[in-house]
């Protein structure tokens, strides 16, 4: 990413990720037997995204140069389970490079 992004658009990316997490939860709850996935990662991912959104909206988010805490969860998941992994990586990349935010 080399072009600036508005905070509004960053928040929309986070909202999209939250939507994807909810959709994944519904899918796995419907058909988890075949995949045998531990669903606790979904709760932790959702909490992390929600906290990021809240902190950004309140102006209390700290861009500390470290990956977002939920990225550990993201990196542990297989791409066929976490199909929106790229979106989460983009959210983390913006966090790591706040100079991209307008």
Image (spheres, helix red, strand yellow):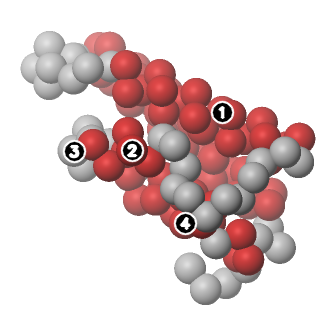
**Mark nearer the viewer, 4 or 2:** 2
Residue that mark 1 sits on: 50
| Within-10-Å neighbours for mark 3: few <14, some 14–19, many 20+ | few
Q: Residues within 10 Å of mark 4 (few under 14, many from 20)?
A: some
Rendered location of residue 92, percent (x, y): 54, 58
Task: Please tell me which of labels 3 and 2 falls first in the chain.
Answer: 2
Give the mark, 4 or 3, whose residue is nearer the N terminus.
3
Residue carrying label 3: 78
Residue 83 appears in the rendering: no
The percent position of residue 43, horizontal first and vertical second, equals 47, 22
Residue 54: percent from the left, percent from the top?
77, 36
The disc label shown at residue 72, or none: 2
In the shown orientation, is residue 40 left or right of residue 68? left
* The C terminus - image quarter: bottom right
Q: Is residue 58 left or right of residue 81?
A: right
SS under mark 4: helix
Q: What percent of the width, then of the height, locates residue 61?
A: 77, 48
Q: Which mark is residue 38?
A: none
Mark 2 falls on what kind of element?
Answer: helix
- The answer to whether one can see residue 102 in this image is yes
Check whether the beta carbons of the residues at disc 4 and disc 3 lie within 8 A of each other. no
Point out the tag, 1 or 4, that comes first from the N-terminus: 1
**Mark pair 4, 2: CA separation:** 14 Å
How many numbered markers are drawn? 4
Residue occupied by mark 4: 93
State which tag comes first along the sequence, 1 or 3. 1
Using residue 3 as the reference point, say whether residue 83 is left or right of it: left
């Amino acid at each position: 990413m080399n072009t600036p992004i508005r905070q509004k658009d960053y928040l929309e990316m986070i909202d999209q990720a939250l939507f994807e997490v909810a959709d994944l939860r519904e899918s796995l709850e419907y058909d988890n037997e075949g995949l045998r996935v531990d669903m606790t990662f979904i709760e932790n991912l959702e909490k992390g995204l929600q906290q990021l959104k809240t902190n950004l909206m309140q102006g209390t988010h700290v861009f500390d140069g470290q990956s977002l805490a939920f990225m550990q969860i993201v990196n542990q998941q297989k791409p066929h389970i976490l199909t929106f992994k790229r979106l989460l990586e983009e959210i983390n990349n913006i966090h790591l490079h706040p100079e991209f935010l307008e």
